[in-house]
């Protein structure tokens, strides 16, 4: 914070005051399990709002030594790193440097399988003078989406499948990889009871877009979702009462 203080808005607080508040927040890592209370003494508690910001801050310090070596390619999302180096020795050196930065953290390395390497939801394959990409799903969640027969609004289920097919298409670099990704998405949809063709999903209107002629002075009255049938019945009653 001291290094970037000139370009940061601390809302009238000093760096020392922010650090005091931060320390107090980090000391409140108390949780209950099986009628007993525990305090986490190291690391960040899952679900804590500060966790993503502090993880990025920590990783920026950890990766600085690696970036000084100028790898061919370096991408990171939170604590997942994707590194390309000219030689295997350079790769081994970068990996060793990452693991030397903290005694409490140990990085694991994943090597390409059949020339493909996963990074987040993308499979990457290096080729002569370029690369190819296709959609990737972790084995632990490969076919897991909201089932078509679950008690969710139809609009939610349509959005899930629509976004799945859109992601599969967007992350694929070539026609062959796009076909592979869409086949995988189609299989996931089919296994979860959805219609086989992604064309049946249709396009969706942006959630923030106004409907033509919509009265923006009306007050929303949210009700718990039970089923699409009950939601339709409620809307019908509201229309008849001229309250829709």
Image: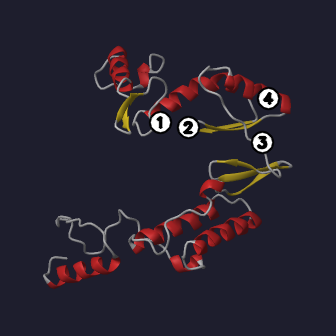
Circle number at residue 92: 4
In the rendered view, how is the structure colored? secondary structure
Find out whether the residues at labels 2 and 1 contact each other: C-beta distance under 8 Å. Answer: yes
Q: Earlier in the sequence, mark 2 or mark 3?
A: 2
Whole-Å distance between the Cαs marked 1 and 4?
27 Å
| Drawn side of residue 121 relative to residue 200, left or right | right
Secondary structure beneath label 4: helix
Secondary structure beneath label 2: loop
Whole-Å distance between the Cαs marked 3 and 1?
26 Å
Q: Earlier in the sequence, mark 1 or mark 4?
A: 1
Circle number at residue 78: 2
**Image quadrant where one finds the C terminus:** bottom left
What residue is at 84 percent from the left and 28 percent from the top? Answer: 89
Of badges 2 and 3, the one in the foreground is 3
Give the labeled residue for mark 1: 52
Give the labeled residue for mark 3: 111
| Residue 208 shows in this picture | yes
């Amino acid at each position: 914070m001291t290094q970037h203080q000139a370009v940061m808005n601390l809302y009238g607080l000093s760096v020392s005051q922010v650090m005091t508040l931060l320390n107090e927040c980090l000391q409140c890592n108390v949780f209950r399990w099986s009628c007993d209370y525990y305090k986490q003494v190291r690391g960040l508690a899952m679900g804590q709002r500060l966790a993503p910001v502090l993880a990025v801050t920590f990783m920026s310090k950890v990766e600085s030594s690696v970036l000084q070596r100028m790898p061919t390619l370096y991408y990171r999302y939170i604590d997942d790193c994707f590194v390309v180096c000219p030689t295997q020795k350079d790769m081994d050196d970068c990996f060793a440097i990452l693991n030397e930065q903290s005694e409490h953290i140990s990085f694991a390395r994943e090597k390409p399988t059949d020339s493909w390497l996963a990074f987040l939801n993308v499979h990457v394959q290096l080729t002569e003078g370029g690369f190819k990409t296709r959609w990737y799903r972790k084995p632990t969640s490969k076919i897991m989406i909201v089932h078509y027969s679950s008690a969710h609004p139809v609009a939610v289920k349509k959005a899930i499948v629509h976004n799945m097919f859109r992601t599969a298409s967007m992350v694929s670099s070539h026609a062959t990889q796009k076909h592979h990704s869409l086949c995988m998405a189609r299989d996931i949809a089919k296994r979860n009871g959805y219609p086989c063709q992604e064309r049946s999903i249709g396009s969706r209107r942006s959630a923030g877009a106004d409907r033509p002629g919509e009265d923006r002075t009306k007050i929303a009255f949210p009700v718990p979702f039970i089923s699409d049938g009950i939601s339709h019945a409620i809307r019908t009653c509201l229309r008849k009462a001229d309250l829709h």
